[in-house]
Amino acid sequence: MNKRGILYITALLCVMVLFSIVAGCKDSPASTKSGRETAKVERVVDGDTFEIKRDGKKEKVRLIGVDTPETKKPNTPVMFYGKEASDFTKKKLENKTVELEWDVEQKDQYGRLLAYVWIGDEMFNRTLVREGYARIATFPPNVKYVDQFKQDQEEARKGSKGLWKDYDKAFEKKK
């Protein structure tokens, strides 16, 4: 092979390597350096569920590790502290950009995305528990932050925050 051919192949290889590096470094527009996915909350359904637009379609997101009193469940009355939890979630999340962090399973049996929701350095799931808007609800294998949730719940319970003012009303047992 002559000198000109070697230069041509070398230049071609350099372009290919450069292209690979640039393509490999490019994040998708909805991802962050931490591995979380950025999303805009379109609508809050209730205290622990909201909708986002992802890949051009609406998707429901269910917060991992928490359960707020019911407000929208068919044939179920609005439970104690349910409206407050729903209003709090709406105030904090609706029309806001958040980061979604996944655990082991990304969807539940109903097709909802399962996520820990971050607003800056604050994990909103923990805030709900800490402030008494939610109790912990653990569904293995999604248990990454269960120990922190337990601590948050114990503090809220001891301080009689939110639903802990009347827990039995917030989560009535069927008889």
Image (cartoon, rainbow, N blue to C red):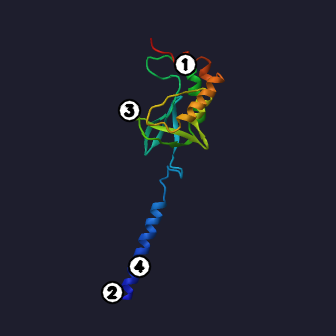
Give the vertical position of 147 relative to 69 (above or below): below
Decide: marks 4, 2 in contact (CB < 8 A)?
no
Graded by Cα atoms within 10 Å as few (under 14), some (14 to 19) or many (20 or more), the crowding at tag 1 reads many
Q: Position of residue 57 (x, y in %)?
A: 42, 41
Three-letter amino acid code at the position of disc 3: Gln
For marks 1 and 4, give the CA distance: 70 Å
In primary-sequence order, the first of circles 3 and 1 is: 3
Name the residue beneath numbered marker 2.
1
For marks 4 and 2, give the CA distance: 13 Å
Name the residue beneath numbered marker 4.
10
Three-letter amino acid code at the position of disc 1: Ala
Name the residue beneath numbered marker 1.
170
Three-letter amino acid code at the position of disc 4: Thr
Q: Position of residue 112 (x, y in %)?
A: 42, 35
Residue 149 visible: yes
Decide: marks 3, 2 in contact (CB < 8 A)?
no
Residue 109 is tagged as: 3
For marks 2 and 1, give the CA distance: 81 Å
Q: Nearer the viewer, residue 171 or 157?
A: 157
SS at circle 1: helix
Graded by Cα atoms within 10 Å as few (under 14), some (14 to 19) or many (20 or more), the crowding at tag 4 reads few
SS at circle 3: loop
For marks 4 and 3, give the CA distance: 53 Å
Three-letter amino acid code at the position of disc 2: Met
SS at circle 4: helix
In primary-sequence order, the first of circles 2 and 1 is: 2
